[in-house]
Amino acid sequence: MMTKMPEAQEGGARRRLDTASLLLGVYAPRGEDPQEPHGQDETYIVMRGSGTFVNGEARKAFGPGDLLFTPANVAHRFEGFSDDLALWVVFYGPEGGESQ
């Protein structure tokens, strides 16, 4: 299967590939990041923009090309991010994460 990836749009995520255990999309929050913890492991790949990724108790500066991981059910969010933030987002594995 081949699919063309969309440009990030304001206001959140766009799903592009959704199977039983994998969801691939583009995430582009604006202003605030309203995320809640998710039931699957999650990886972000920064396409453009910069800011701080809060992952549980950890905080990490990020920029284009960075890969960010958060395990299932861990509170996480983007803070102080630039207006052009756009990320690939990949949810994968079983509910509860692969470490279950």
Image: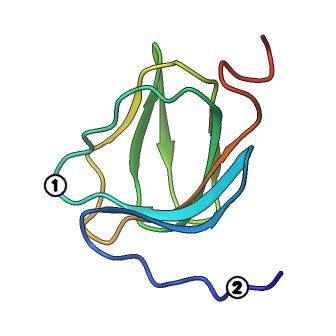
Is disc 1 placed on a helix, strand or loop? loop
Marker disc for residue 31: 1
Residue at 80% x, 23% y: name it. 98
In the image, farthest residue toward the left: 31
Residue name at image x 56 percent, y 26 percent: 39
The correct choice, above or below, for 97 with respect to 87 in the image is above
Pick the quarter of the image with the N terminus: bottom right
Is residue 95 something one can see in this rendering?
A: yes
Residue 100 % position (x, y)? 78, 10
Q: Going by the image, does 56 lie left or right of 77?
A: right
First reached walking from the N terminus: tag 2 or tag 1: 2
Where is 26 relative to 72, above or below? Answer: below
Instruction: Provide residue 57's location: percent of width, then percent of height.
Output: 45, 13
Which residue of the protein is positioned furthest toward the front in this rendering?
20
Q: In the visual, does 40 lie left or right of 100?
A: left
User: Of residues 7 and 50, which is closer to you in this image?
Assistant: 7
